[in-house]
Amino acid sequence: MDSAAFKEVLEAVRRFIREDVVPREREIELSDEVPAEIRRKAVDMGLFGYTLPEEYGGMGASVEEDVRLCFEFGYTSLAFRSMFGTNIGIAGQVLVNYGSQEQRETWLPRLADGAVASFALTEAEAGSDPSGMKTRAVDTGDGHYEISGAKRFITNAAVADVFMVFARSGEGVRATDGISCFLVEKDTPGLVIGPKDAKTGQAGAWTSEVFFDQVRVAHTALVGGLAGQGFNAAMRSLAKGRVHVAALCVGQATRALEESVEYARHSKQGGEPIGRFQLVQAMLAESRAELDAARALVLDVARRYDSGEDTKIGPSTAKLFATEMADRVADRAVQIHGGMGYMRETTVERISRDVRVMRIYEGTSEVQKLIIGRALLRG
């Protein structure tokens, strides 16, 4: 995307979020659903496919452009971004990077036009480390695979049109060998979506269990037509997704800090604004310093990802630092608000719940430390 076109997109997204989404955050929280008109406008703006290649109806946004948009998406309820997050991120990128030409031509334009893809990797005993995956895909010898197993915490499962399903289709020397990815359309016999999960935060962003009871799919559903490349496909998508998540955390922390500054200016104790108290100023200063550091880190990692200089360590460092940072900034924001910070009608209370999961999904903070440490020792 050329710089002028991207600037227009960025400004349009910023206006849309502040004028249309922010005023309805409380409604999203209470109804556990993003209003249909907001979804339609997001589709019309091209947000359901902005990272997908232009030849398939997307905008072809770079990683740096993605994170700049995520700074804006993260300013409001994370349910807004979650509507299209799997399309432009972990699910859509599997097709972009590993799908066959026919699979890309069939599905990417549909995703860009508002269809929803879901990334079915996580299991109850295989989360940040998918090597323990138990879902299996058996070649039945008649041109089909039969998939059986269960997936957990699957974002957008209840509204998905197609699932990128990771299953063990063979064996190998390593536990990560023999994992393949399959395109499974909704309403395929044997595919069952569980109830929406009751979560601590991120109301309006739905996750569910997904069950596969001898689900039959044709050999053409094997992503890329090559068995055994599922683990690599998942890891590549997750690495890029970690930069995306880090950028969302910058957006959430930006909003939390803005809310805290505004509250400190106007809320009074003992007849004067609490912003006059030095310990409140110290919390604001710490949050600003950490936020600035995270923003600079995320932008640098995004640029190095785009150039190909670093597509492995950088995403993990960005996710580790930015997610932990957002949690600290949100916690300080609640503290600055005092009792009001614990009330559900307060923005920072919602943010404190919403950002907590960022340290868990797409690889926990602990897993990011292992990735970074092992990579450094390999040299």
Image (tube, rainbow, N blue to C red):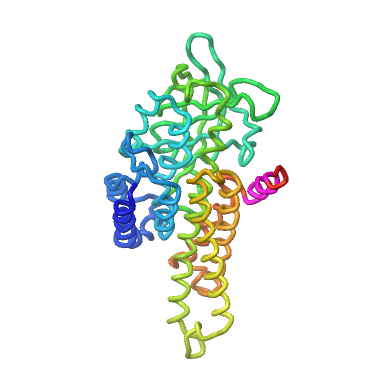
Q: Residue at x 36, y 44 (%)?
A: 50
Report the predominant secondary structure element of the magenta stretch: helix
**Residue 148 against residue 109 in the figure, above or below:** above
Q: Which x, y percent locates residue 335?
A: 56, 72
The answer to whether residue 228 is above or below residue 270 is above
- Please give the range of residues in magenta: 365-375
Q: Position of residue 267 (x, y in %)?
A: 45, 81
Quadrant in the picture for residue 379 = top right
Residue drawn at (45%, 26%), measured in percent from left and top?
183
Q: Is residue 213 left or right of residue 16?
A: right
Counting from the top left corner in percent of width and height, residue 17 is at: 34, 58
Q: Is residue 268 left or right of residue 152?
A: left
Residue at the extreme top: 142
Residues 104 and 126: in front is 104
Q: Per the image, is 186 magenta?
A: no
Q: Residue 289's x, y, as percent?
A: 55, 70
